[in-house]
Image (tube, rainbow, N blue to C red):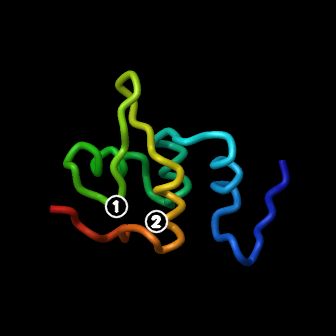
Amino acid sequence: MEKQRSSNSPTPNLDALATTRDFVSTEEAAALLNRKPQTLRKWSCYDKGALRPIRVYGRLQWCIKEIAALLRGNGSTLNSAHS
């Protein structure tokens, strides 16, 4: 598999995923966000963080569109706290 980065898209792998899937696992989301999976689990557990996951059969799933918006600066910031 060849990785190519275009100057207008900061997340080419995410764009490719978005064409075939709506959600990614915690591990995949953490890799895309450059965070540890446990950080995303804490976001979910404490209901704080930049994104909110859904649960599918007890597993967390993270919306690709929300991840893309966050990485492009169109969503919450990674350091913001939700009340």
Snapshot quadrant of residue 59? top left
Q: Is residue 18 or residue 4 the one in the foreground?
A: 18
Residue 25 higher or lower than 67, as above or below: above
- The first of marks 2 and 1 along the sequence is 1
Snapshot quadrant of residue 50? bottom left
Q: Residues within 10 Å of mark 2 (few under 14, many from 20)?
A: some
Q: Looking at this rendering, what residue extends furthest in the top direction?
A: 57
State the image coordinates of residue 44 (x, y, percent, origin top left): 28, 45
Residue for badge 1: 50
Residue for badge 2: 70
Q: Is residue 1 or residue 47 the one in the foreground?
A: 47
Q: Looking at this rendering, what residue extends furthest in the bottom direction?
A: 7
Q: Residue at x 68, y 40 (%)?
A: 20
The quadrant of the rendering that contains the C terminus is bottom left
Q: Residue at x 33, y 49 (%)?
A: 52
Q: Please report contact status of discs 2 and 1: CB closer than 8 Å, yes or no.
A: yes
Label 2 – label 1 distance at C-alpha: 8 Å
Residue 63 higher or lower than 71, as above or below: above
Q: Amino acid at mark 1?
A: Ala
Snapshot quadrant of residue 81? bottom left
What numbered label is drawn on residue 22?
none
Q: Residue at x 67, y 56 (%)?
A: 15
State the image coordinates of residue 77 (x, y, percent, origin top left): 37, 71
Q: Residues within 10 Å of mark 1 (few under 14, many from 20)?
A: some
State the image coordinates of residue 60 (x, y, percent, origin top left): 39, 36
Label 2: which secondary element: helix
Left or right: 12 as drawn, with respect to 50: right
Q: Residue at x 79, y 58 (%)?
A: 3
Q: Amino acid at mark 2?
A: Leu
